Image (cartoon, grey):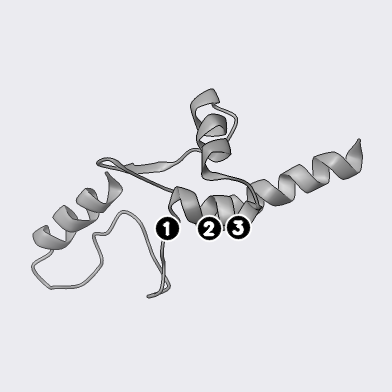
Amino acid sequence: MYLLRERKALQRNSSGGLANMEIDIQSSDFRLWNIAEVAASLGVSAKFIEKLRTAGDFIPAIVIGRCVRWDPSAVQAYAHSLTEKAAAA
């Protein structure tokens, strides 16, 4: 959904610049992860990630049409937060 807003903002910007983009992506290699990449990075199955997602126990996904994606830094922060919870207990 946010990609469509970016595209429309770029189309409206007659100067060709990126001034009207709603999301500022600093790195040219910015890439979202699919469910298989998220599962591999956490060392679990894609089915387990899907169960967590549908139960509302996982970080919110970015849904673009039928594609479900996650920000890699958010996935890493989620994994780190689980580590801290386990260490505090």
CA–CA distance in space, label 3 to label 1: 13 Å
**What residue does disc 2 label?**
72
Residue 56 screen position, x and y as percent: 54, 27
The quadrant in which residue 62 appears is top left
User: From the viewer's perspective, is 66 left or right of 32?
Assistant: left
Residue 13 in the image, given as x and y percentages of width and height: 13, 63
Residue contact between numbered discs 3 and 2, judged by CB atoms under 8 Å: yes
Image position of 17 (left or right of 60): left
Please state which amino acid type lies under the numbered disc 3.
Ser
The first of marks 3 and 2 along the sequence is 3
Question: Which amino acid type corresponds to the residue marked 2 in the rendered image?
Answer: Pro
Q: Where's the N terminus, which quadrant? A: top left
Above or below, comparing residue 86 to residue 55 in the picture: below
Under mark 1, the amino acid is Leu
Q: Is residue 60 left or right of residue 8?
A: right
Q: Quadrant of the C terminus?
A: top right
Give the residue at mark 3: 41
The reply to whether dot 3 and dot 1 touch (C-beta < 8 Å) is no
Residue 3: percent from left, percent from top: 26, 53
For label 3, the crowd category at 10 Å Cα-Cα, with few meaning under 14, some 14 to 19 and many 20 or more, is some
Q: Secondary structure at mark 2?
A: helix
Q: Nearer the viewer, mark 3 or mark 2?
A: 3
Q: What residue is shown at x 54% (from left), y 24% (from top)? A: 55
Q: Position of residue 59 (x, y in %)?
A: 55, 39
* Sequence-first disc among 1 and 2: 1
Q: Number of callouts in the render? A: 3
Q: Give the Cα distance between marks 3 and 2.
A: 9 Å
Q: Secondary structure at mark 1?
A: loop
Disc on res. 32: 1
- Outermost residue on the top side: it is 55
Q: Residues within 10 Å of mark 1 (few under 14, many from 20)?
A: some
31 lies above or below 86: below
